[in-house]
Image (cartoon, grey):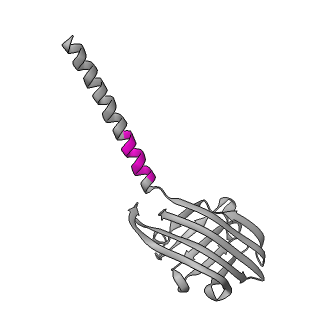
Amino acid sequence: MAGKTSTIAFALLGVAIAAIGVMIGVLMARHGAMKVGGNVNVDGTSLGTFWFGVNDCTSGAAFVPPYLGANLRAEGGFGLRVVDSGDKARLWVFSQGGKQGALTIDKGNCSEWDVVVDWAHKTANRVSMVNGHVRVQCAVGGGTVKANVTFERCAQ
């Protein structure tokens, strides 16, 4: 009977250790995962009128030459590139993979400008991650561009 009790206790201990390991793994994965979301609305510009929801990002540190910023992408090849932070930041909006060109935006074109990019102090695949947000309303290309996007832990 004592041997059977020991076997059951050992089995329960093994299950408990495995469950704790799974919980730690899930928490670590959630802590390190990229988060990106938000929308970009382009209306009446030289690129046309379109809207996209941002769902992917890459740190500017992954490019050659590397830069402080992020390349924010959406389905269909739409994108928003952010280079630098604050008043000196510059944005580029791309439609459908840049086939029609890009709109270049700086603070002088905008009535609202809240662009922040900062290093996340973490790396993935030897690429420094970035965090930030873009909240702008700008007159450019004969129309308007409005963006409200946030991103965390963008790497590659």
Q: Is residue 91 or residue 12 the one in the foreground? A: 12
Q: Where is 36 relative to 108, above or below?
A: above
Give residue 138's position: percent from left, percent from top. 69, 81
Q: State yes or no: residue 25 in magenta.
A: yes
Residue 126 in view in this figure: no
Give residue 119's position: percent from left, percent from top. 43, 72
Residue 140 in view in this figure: yes
Give residue 67's position: percent from left, percent from top. 47, 77
Q: Which residues are magenta?
A: 22-30
Q: Where is 40 relative to 143, above or below?
A: above
| Farthest residue, direction top | 1
Give residue 19's position: percent from left, percent from top. 37, 35
Quadrant of the image for the N terminus? top left
Give the overall secondary structure of the magenta segment: helix
Q: Is residue 80 or residue 31 the one in the foreground? A: 31
| Farthest residue, direction left | 2
Q: Is residue 16 left or right of residue 62?
A: left
Q: Where is 149 relative to 8, above or below?
A: below
Q: State yes or no: residue 126 in magenta.
A: no
Name the residue rendered at 43%, 55% in the picture: 31
